Every structure is written in C-alpha cells, then in structure tokens.
Amino acid sequence: MSVEIYNNLPVPAEGEAIQAGDGRILVPDRPIIPFIEGDGTGPDIWRAARQVFDAAVGQAYGGQRQVVWYEVFAGEKAFNHFNVWLPQDTLNAIQRFHVAIKGPLTTPVGGGIRSLNVSLRQLLDLYVCMRPVRYFPGVPSPVKQPEALNVVIFRENTEDVYAGIEWQAGTPQARKVTGFLNAEMNTRIDPESAIGIKPMSARASKRLIRRAIQYALDGGHRSVTLVHKGNIMKFTEGAFRDWGYDLVREEFSGVCVTEAEAGGAGAAGKLLIKDRIADSMFQQVLLRPAEYDVIATPNLNGDYLSDACAAQVGGLGMAPGANIGDAHGVFEATHGTAPKYAGKDVINPSSVILSGVMMFEFMGWKEAARLIEHGITETIRQKRVTYDLHRLMEGARQLKTSEFAAAIVENMRAHQAAA
Ligand code: NAP
C-alpha cells in the first residue's frame, strides 16, 4: 500500500482517518488528527495541551482509544520549511482527516497572504463559528455574578458584511456601484462613498440556526435565542429572525415552542425559541445572563457578542473556539501568538485545552471532554494558575505552562481514582 504524504511528512501508519457520511463523522479508536502547533507561544501551549489531551483519553478509555497526532504546517513554521505561509498540503490534510486543532498564528504584515481560517472556511464550508462562554470558579471577572453567564454562541460564518465584498472610496468600482444604485435603485448615496455589501440568505441562516437548535436539543438546553438587528436592517437581519421561526415551524414544531406561543406559561418541557435585538442583547447578557443559553446570530453580531461575553467571565485569554461544517471541525485558540512570551513556558494554555474539549465533544468522546473540564476547573479552584490569572487572583500560586498542564493531569487522575 502506498504511504500518504502531506508536506513531506508520511501519515502515521498506526492511525486511521475519520470518515464522514450522511452529515455525520465516524471516529475510529485511533483517529489521525492533524495539528498546527502555532507561532510565538504556540509551541509552549501546544506541548501543554497535548499532554492533557493524551492523559484524558488514556484515563477515560483505559488505553482503548488514542489520538494519533499528525503535524501539519501553517504560519512561520510553514514559511521557514516551505517558503509559503499556508501550504496547499495543509488544507488537503485537514480536508482528508476531518478534524484538526490549531494554535495561534502570526498574521504576516503586508497583503497577498491567504488566511488559514478564510481558506479552510471556504474549502470545507465551515459555516458555524462556535464559542462556548462559561465561568470557571476563581477566575477574576469584572461582574458581580460571573457564574450566571453560561452560553454557547453559534455565529454564522460565511455571509454578512464578513463576506468581504467591499470597494474603497473614490475607486472606479465604488463609483460604478453608487452610480448604479443612484440611477436604478432610487438611492441618494454620495458617489465618493466606500461601499460594502451585506448578503444574507435563507439557506445559510437556516443551516446555522438548525445546527444551534439541534445542539440545544441534544444537550438538553433550555432555550435558543436568535440575536439580530432586524428593527433597522429588515431584509437581512430581520429576515434572519423570520427564517429562524420558519425553520422552527417547518422542522422542529413538535419539540420547540416560541416565546410568543408560550406567553408567560413557560416552555412545558420543550425548547424555548426567542429572539432579541442585538443592542438590547448586550444589556441582557450583563443584567439577566441566566435567561440565556444557546444563541444563534449573524456573523458581525456574533463576533462582538462572543468577545463581550468572554470578557464578562474574565476569560478572554481562556476562550475556546471552533469552526464547524457538516463533516469537518477545526478547533483553535482564540487569542494571538503573544510573541514576547515565546519559549518562556509561562503562557496560559487554557484556550487550546478548552478547544480540545470542544473537539472531543465533536468526535463524540464526551468522557474525555468532561474529564479535562473537571481537571481545569479543579486546578483553577485550587488557585494554581499561570501568570495572567495569578496577577489578578489573591492568594494564588503561580505555575509555569508545563506545571499548569501537569496539575490538570494530576486532578484528572485524582477524579478518576475517586470515581
Ligand atoms: P495576542 O497574541 O493575543 O497577545 C496580546 C496580549 O494578550 C499578550 O501580550 C498577553 O497579555 C495576553 N495573552 C494572549 N494570549 C495569552 C495567553 N494564552 N495567556 C496569557 N495571556 C495571553 O495579541 P497580539 O499581540 O495583538 O497579536 C500577536 C500576533 O498574533 C499577531 O501576529 C496577530 O496577528 C496574531 N493573532 C493570531 C490569532 C489567531 O491565530 N487566532 C488571533 C489574534 C492575533 P499581557 O502582555 O498583558 O500578559
């Protein structure tokens, strides 16, 4: 049998590829998972995260399962090895193996560089950007009751103003578009304006909302909130809300109830579907966070809301993220490369570790996911933390990146032994 090779590295013979069919993935006991170590502090946090992942899988499945890691390259490491920031082989390998995890990457200054996230999103149709936001007891937070916020944000990942369709002010293209709009569409736009386009379709909105509702039903969540700015942008954001309610009627009528249908009577065991206007939602997550659970929202709202929520629980540096399609998932640290700490073994690896929790959930390896969550929660509760949390927590003990990972593994082991 011929050996598969990407970026000059043979695929490990001891693993098997994850397969996909009927919109589901089928995960073998020894799946090959490509990883991108990342730039700057990427190697520090990847080393720590991998130690935690391997220990969690080993402990949860008693040796029956094991991740077979396979390095693929992007960013500075790719540039140094192959003279290109994003090799086509890296994209091909992630497409082939369905699930991948990445550390942060340097964004090279200057144009003409393909972005990994944009390339992967287009190639693999990763239409959901998923950001769970929850509080870990002990983490310093700017609000009085950070534990009241526990949401999972499903942000549409392919449309909206992020589609990248825009023209610079004063260019012939921008003048052509404003000329057409003023002449044919009865608008009065300053011809010297910059122009951006906000496309939103029923197809992309519904598949995102369907994913959020299915996730909420599978996980026994209480509600899904559609967050939009439909009072102003009626035919885009307003349509997002309307398409969401259409979808509920078409596909989920037996298991969901809308807020209008429920009145004040409660959801009676069904999943409650509600909607909120985006600006009011920013107040709501601060003032009445406990009323929100799963959130589905267009691209731009989701970008703002996920960072605002993460800041509220004090966890911007600990916030995990994933880009997900029907048959692919790419999991990633949401912070940057923090280059001044590179190689110092001090940075907080929680963002990549929690992205790994999402990865194991996506793979159906829930026992490993729960174990890691327990390990990290317990370690922070014991006030054994990296420098970033240490400087804000009273009475905490400062650990190196590698020591923090070892403490998580120790707490997972103690939990398994007690169980
Ligand atoms: P950054 O790397 O996120 O770092 C900014 C600051 O945030 C750090 O100096 C540190 O603050 C804190 N921080 C970030 N990650 C941390 C962690 N794991 N643990 C503890 N503290 C952490 O942002 P940047 O300096 O603006 O960007 C550096 C490079 O990363 C740029 O090339 C940028 O384009 C790239 N970037 C990549 C991604 C990605 O790949 N997803 C995302 C954003 C940025 P203190 O100095 O206060 O300790």
Image (spheres, helix red, strand yellow):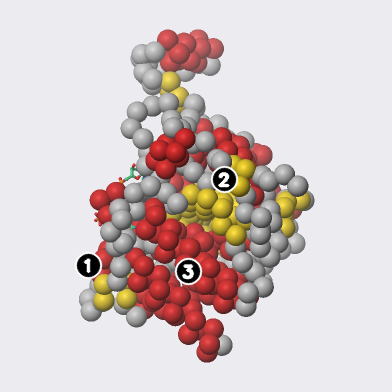
Q: Residue 108: give x, y in percent of width and height.
A: 36, 35
Classed neighbour count for the residue bearing mark 2: other residues with Cα under 10 Å, few (<14), some (14–19), many (≥20) = few
- The image's mark for residue 9 is 2
Number of numbered discs on residues: 3
Q: Tell me the mark number nearer the camera, choosing from 2 and 3.
A: 2
Q: Earlier in the sequence, mark 1 or mark 2?
A: 2
Q: Tell me the mark number nearer the camera, choosing from 1 and 2.
A: 2
Real-space Cα distance between discs 1 and 2? Answer: 42 Å
Decide if residue 256 is on the left or right side of residue 417: right
Q: Earlier in the sequence, mark 2 or mark 3?
A: 2
Residue at 54 percent across and 12 percent down: it is 184
Classed neighbour count for the residue bearing mark 3: other residues with Cα under 10 Å, few (<14), some (14–19), many (≥20) = many
Secondary structure under tag 2 reads: strand
The part of the image, by quadrant, that contains residue 24 is: bottom right
Real-space Cα distance between discs 2 and 3? Answer: 25 Å
Q: Residue 324: give x, y in percent of width and height.
A: 59, 50
